[in-house]
């Protein structure tokens, strides 16, 4: 006895094939929609902001008047902040990754640290702002300074750097470590001369991407109370400062339409900074990819 | 090399033996693990710092405002001088409105994009589109906020004339766009890890690609997909700048999405940029709200981890 | 080469008519219909010419075994028969593969339709991560059978057909991954039977199984051939000898010899076939 009726199967075949191609189109449109948003966003910001991009814009401080507003303090502030975040977060992040991958025994304490890191990665950035406000700004009396903001942001991107570094270290083949130990090298020698050199491209790529996230971050800085309009450049680690996203936030909030264009110009500068950082990361990734 | 300078022959083994006995080297071998474990403890200290900061300052807040008023109050009016009200429900509702709208945008689009990338697209297409999604994920939230306020809201106002300048709809949609790449990329990872042999099994029965995707791959990758959605929604709950710029500062306890709202995060930003005096009830209130936000996202993150661990398919 | 091939083919057809083995002939006296008629079929993986000028005529209700050393193209060939080979993006083909008289390589031939008629069992068991019941019902369901009672009957019939009903009838709702490798493979065969295909392709179905499971699958193949045409790729010559009616010997992407199994194993015409069978290479 036959259960499958051939004529029915063939009849259904047509509609099944039709559904397949219709849904393929739907899936494709959904994908394109996401990409289209990016294009609209970029086109809109470039057309709005490019008119304001000139030398004065880079050379002026913030101002109440759109035509006099510039990003000198914000741009330099962002770069200086980066110079603090990069070493702090990388020393802590890579150190933790080496500990977890090379030294830590598989026990409850290690899996606790590991679980803690993945949970820390999911904490909203604004909560890090509250942490920084209490610990760095008030308890350690660093004030609304570069240092307080740098420490806060370093902790914010720490989980990302740890995870990226762990992956890079884990990708170094066991045989390479064994070869080093086999010649009588100590553990620390093996780590510094074999493991880290092989893992450094992955570590750098992950760190630069994390850093670019910190550069674009606004919320924690707002909570720390970092001022927006500054008429001077920071002169030390404990000096006040402002950053690009904060400056853009301030402009975007203003009611005058002209400030929209100033904000767009600021966004262009911020995006160019991020594109440069991402390109470096991608360059490193492609150049040193898969050497084993 | 072996006869260098010393005048007497020295074998490599001897040189190695000498260097081995140097005290400094032994010291470093002992010291480094200690330094590294200290760096590892910083991440634990960060968590402890967050939890204790939130608990202590929130405790201070509850010295002044009763817990029940906070948890069940339907009005959030901290700035009304004579009789401030601290009922958190309007802030939670504002957050949920934005997150639900975001999920409505991001979940179908993200999963559809994941299916397309994982099941239909050629290798070349996939290699082009995935980096673009990464770019989309890397756009700073302040840029998305600006986009919501100056582009999406005016556009929506053309369609819905009653839409206010500050509303839940526009930031909701833009938060959805922001978390879309996360869902697409994590779901695609989950679907790609379904082994090809299973796809082939279905194709060999005469299944179309659609049937393979929906009836075989999607169920097999479901835990990963759900985990990605939960993580993305958690990100939406904690999102700050988009809702601060485009959502407004009016905490309301209703289900209207066209009017001004305030989320938990936007309230913290409002107080912080207004420079509320240290030690005032308003100052402590941002910690209470931050703690509430932290609990929400922590539960979501733990849930995502649980789902992806508990229901992981072993092939 | 082509000439030589044609010659072999002619000799082969000539040989079928010479009654060399009377017992064998009596069963083959019925002229069976052609299922898969492959003509001058070529296949490339990028630049690699994996199948060269294949000519094979496979008949219905027979077990056809395809043997040959690793990399000879036997798996590629069987995957070409239901066009699964196209899942590798760099594949190019030419020539003809006629299934019941129609060339399946034509662009207008829908692969889904072809694969509904031509089922396949894979090298490694690949059940879906679903219950046993849902695995078997998957095919009928995509073809539009929703009636629970009919599905129940199909599931039972298919599981019985794959000789695994008694082992799993009490746990149809359990995940198929909980079964042993041999049971999983018979579930995959049952899944294939559930859409009542015309031809079953088997790509080294026992290579991942233990000897007892292998024996069960082999017995099953013998039973199935009354109702289905079976093409089985195997690296195990004894298996080919045990279960097949005809055998094709592949070497370096070419068909060296195709004939009744007993002839291939007793009196091979080509020196290379003899070398392979007697274990001199491969």
Image (cartoon, coloured by chain):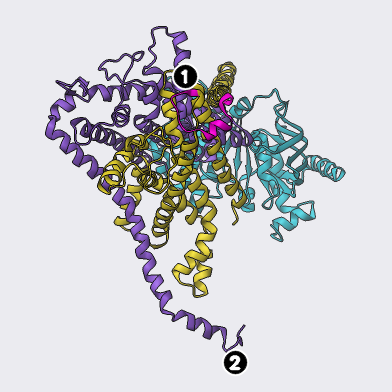
**Residue tagged 2:** B7
Tell me, by letter, which chain the rendering colours purple: B
Magenta-span inclusion, residue C24: no
Q: Nearer the viewer, residue B12 or B57?
A: B57
- Chain colored cyan: C
Quick check: do tags 1 and 2 share a chain?
yes
Q: Give the camera-side residue of A139 and B312.
A: A139
Q: Residue C14, located in which quarter of the rendered image?
A: top right
Q: Please provide percent x and percent y for residue B127.
A: 60, 37
Q: In terms of secondary structure, where does tag 2 sit?
A: loop
Residue B215: percent from the left, percent from the top? Answer: 47, 28
Among all residues in the image, which is located at the extreme bottom? B8
Looking at the image, can residue C192 be seen? no
**Left or right of A191 on screen, residue B74:** left
The residue nearer to you, when weighing B216 against C15, is B216
Q: CA distance from mark 1 to mark 2?
A: 81 Å
Question: Image height check: is A276 above or below A184?
Answer: above
Magenta-colored stretch includes residue A60 = yes
List the residue tagged with mark 1.
B150
Relative to C276, is C196 above or below? above
Q: Earlier in the sequence, mark 1 or mark 2?
A: 2
Label 2 Cα neighbours within 10 Å, binned few <14 / some 14-19 / many ≥20: few
The structure residue drawn at horizontal position 45% and vertical position 21%, both measured from the top left corner, is B148
Judging by colour alone, the chain drawn in yellow in this rendered image is: A
Image spot of residue C13 (x, y percent) = 80, 39
Which region shows up in magenta?
A50-66
Q: Residue B28 falls in which quadrant of the image?
A: bottom left
Report if residue C92 is visible in the image.
Answer: yes
Query: Which chain is indicated by disc 2?
Result: B
């Amino acid at each position: 006895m036959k259960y499958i009726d051939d004529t029915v199967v063939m009849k259904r075949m047509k509609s099944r094939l039709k559904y397949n191609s219709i849904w393929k189109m739907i899936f494709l449109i959904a994908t394109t929609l996401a990409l289209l948003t990016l294009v609209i966003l970029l086109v809109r910001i470039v057309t709005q902001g490019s008119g304001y991009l000139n030398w004065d814009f880079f050379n002026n401080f913030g101002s109440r008047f759109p035509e006099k507003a510039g990003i000198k303090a914000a741009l330099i502030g962002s770069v200086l902040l980066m110079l603090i975040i990069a070493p702090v977060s990388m020393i802590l992040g890579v150190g933790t990754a080496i500990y977890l991958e090379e030294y830590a025994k598989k026990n409850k304490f290690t899996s606790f640290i590991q679980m803690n890191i993945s949970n820390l990665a999911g904490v909203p950035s604004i909560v890090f702002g509250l942490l920084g406000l209490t610990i760095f700004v008030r308890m350690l009396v660093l004030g609304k300074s570069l240092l307080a903001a740098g420490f806060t942001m370093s902790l914010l991107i720490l989980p990302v750097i740890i995870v990226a570094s762990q992956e890079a270290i884990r990708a170094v083949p066991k045989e390479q470590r064994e070869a080093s130990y086999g010649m009588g090298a100590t553990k620390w020698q093996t780590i510094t001369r074999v493991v880290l050199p092989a893992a450094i491209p992955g570590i750098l790529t992950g760190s630069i991407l994390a850093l670019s996230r910190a550069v674009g971050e606004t919320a924690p800085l707002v909570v720390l109370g970092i001022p927006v309009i500054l008429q001077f450049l920071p002169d030390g680690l404990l000096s006040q400062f402002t950053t690009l996203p904060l400056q853009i936030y301030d402009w975007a909030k203003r009611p005058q339409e002209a400030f929209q264009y100033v904000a767009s110009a600021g966004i262009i500068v911020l995006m160019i900074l991020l594109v440069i950082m991402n390109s470096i990361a991608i360059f490193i990734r492609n150049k040193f990819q898969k050497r084993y | 090399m072996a006869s260098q300078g010393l005048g007497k022959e020295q074998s490599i083994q001897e040189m190695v033996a000498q260097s081995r006995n140097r005290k400094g080297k032994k010291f470093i071998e002992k010291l480094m693990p200690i330094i590294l474990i200290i760096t590892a403890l910083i991440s634990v200290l960060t968590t402890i710092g967050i939890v204790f900061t939130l608990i202590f300052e929130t405790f201070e807040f509850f010295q002044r405002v009763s817990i029940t008023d906070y948890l069940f109050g339907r009005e959030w009016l901290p700035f009304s001088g004579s009789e401030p009200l601290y009922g958190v429900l309007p802030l939670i509702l504002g957050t949920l409105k934005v997150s639900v709208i975001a999920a409505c945008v991001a979940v179908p689009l993200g999963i559809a994009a994941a299916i397309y990338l994982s099941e239909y697209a050629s290798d070349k297409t996939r290699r082009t589109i995935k980096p673009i999604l990464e770019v989309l994920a890397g756009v700073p939230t302040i840029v998305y906020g600006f986009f919501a306020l100056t582009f999406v809201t005016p556009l929506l106002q053309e369609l819905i004339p009653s839409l206010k300048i500050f509303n839940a709809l526009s930031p909701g949609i833009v938060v959805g766009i922001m978390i879309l790449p996360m869902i697409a990329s994590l779901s695609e990872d989950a679907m790609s890890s379904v082994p090809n042999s299973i796809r082939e099994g279905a194709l060999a029965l005469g299944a179309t690609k659609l049937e393979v995707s929906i009836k075989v791959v999607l169920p097999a990758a479901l835990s990963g997909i759900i985990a990605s959605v939960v993580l993305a929604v958690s990100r939406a709950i904690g999102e700050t700048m988009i809702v601060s710029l485009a959502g407004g500062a009016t905490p309301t306890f209703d289900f209207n999405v066209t009017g001004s709202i305030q989320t938990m995060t936007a309230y913290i930003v409002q107080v912080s940029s207004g420079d509320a005096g240290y030690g005032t009830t308003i100052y402590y209130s941002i910690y209470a709200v931050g703690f509430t936000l932290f609990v929400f996202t922590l539960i979501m993150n733990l849930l995502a981890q649980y789902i992806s661990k508990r229901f992981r398919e072993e092939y | 080469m082509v000439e030589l091939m044609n010659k072999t083919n002619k000799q082969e057809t000539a040989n079928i008519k010479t009654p060399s083995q009377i017992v064998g002939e009596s069963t083959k006296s019925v002229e069976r219909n052609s299922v898969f008629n492959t003509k001058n079929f070529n296949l490339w993986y990028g630049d690699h010419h994996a199948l060269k000028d294949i000519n094979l005529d496979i008949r219905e209700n027979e077990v056809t075994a395809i043997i040959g050393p690793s990399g000879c193209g036997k798996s590629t060939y069987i995957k070409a028969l239901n066009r699964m080979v196209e899942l590798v993006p760099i594949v190019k083909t030419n020539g003809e593969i006629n299934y019941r008289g129609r060339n399946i390589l034509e662009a207008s031939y829908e692969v889904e339709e072809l694969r509904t008629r031509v089922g396949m069992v894979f090298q490694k068991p690949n059940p879906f991560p679903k219950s046993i019941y849902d695995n078997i019902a998957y095919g009928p369901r995509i073809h539009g059978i929703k009636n629970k009672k009919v599905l129940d009957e199909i599931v039972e019939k298919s599981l019985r057909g794959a000789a695994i009903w008694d082992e799993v009838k009490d746990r149809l709702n359990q995940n198929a991954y909980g079964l042993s490798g041999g049971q999983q493979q018979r579930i995959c065969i049952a899944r294939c039977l559930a859409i009542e295909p015309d031809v079953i392709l088997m790509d080294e179905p026992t290579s991942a199984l233990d000897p007892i499971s292998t024996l069960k699958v082999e017995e099953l193949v013998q039973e199935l051939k009354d109702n289905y045409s079976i093409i089985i790729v195997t690296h195990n010559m004894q298996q080919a000898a045990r279960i097949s009616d005809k055998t094709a010997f592949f070497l370096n992407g070419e068909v060296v010899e195709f004939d009744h199994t007993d002839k291939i194993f007793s009196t091979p015409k080509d020196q290379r076939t003899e070398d392979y069978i007697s274990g001199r290479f491969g």
